[in-house]
């Protein structure tokens, strides 16, 4: 009976080591998948930031052009009324 005990202990130790390796393998696969997901998210965020960086100066340019157009229109409207007032007085 004595010779079978070490074999059983050795087999149990091997089984425990195999279980630990399997757990590590699962953990590594899970962490790799998590990292890949985060990288995809960062790539999408980076693309959005680049698009926004391109769009914002264009929007600023359009807003400036509209503001200039409005101010020119206001000046054009004000100028005839001012000259009319001056000629009437």
Image (cartoon, rainbow, N blue to C red):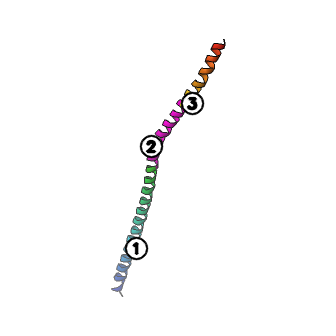
The local crowd at label 1, few if under 14, some if 14 to 19, many if 20 or more residues have their Cα within 10 Å, is: few
- What residue do we see at 42% from left, 53% from top? 43
Q: Which residue is mark 3?
A: 70
Determine whether the residue tagged by mark 2 lies in a helix, strand or loop: helix
Q: Earlier in the sequence, mark 2 or mark 3?
A: 2
Determine whether the residue tagged by mark 1 lies in a helix, strand or loop: helix
Could you say where residue 57 lies in the image, as x and y percent from the top left?
46, 39
Q: Which residue is mark 2?
A: 54
- Please say whether residue 59 is one of the residues in the magenta stretch: yes
Q: CA distance from mark 1 to mark 3?
A: 75 Å
Front residue of 6/38: it is: 38
Residue 25: quadrant of the picture: bottom left
Task: Determine the main secondary structure of the stretch shown in magenta.
Answer: helix
Front residue of 23/65: it is: 65
Query: Quick one: which residue is furthest to the right in this view?
Result: 88
Could you say where residue 28 lies in the image, as x and y percent from the top left?
39, 65
Q: Earlier in the sequence, mark 1 or mark 3?
A: 1
Determine whether the residue tagged by mark 3 lies in a helix, strand or loop: helix
Could you say where residue 29 lies in the image, as x and y percent from the top left?
41, 66
Query: Quick one: which residue is furthest to the bottom in this view?
Result: 1
Relative to 44, residue 22 above or below: below
What is the span of residues highlighted in magenta in the rendered image?
48-68
Query: Quick one: which residue is furthest to the top in this view?
Result: 89
Q: Which residue is mark 1?
A: 19
């Amino acid at each position: 009976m004595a010779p079978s005990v070490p074999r059983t202990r050795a087999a149990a130790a091997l089984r425990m080591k195999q279980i630990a390796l399997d757990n590590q393998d699962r953990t590594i696969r899970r962490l790799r998948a998590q990292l890949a997901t985060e990288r995809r998210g960062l790539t999408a965020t980076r693309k959005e930031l680049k698009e926004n960086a391109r769009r914002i100066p264009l929007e600023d340019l359009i807003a400036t052009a509209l503001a200039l157009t409005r101010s020119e229109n206001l000046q054009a409207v004000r100028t005839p009324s001012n000259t009319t007032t001056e000629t009437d007085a």
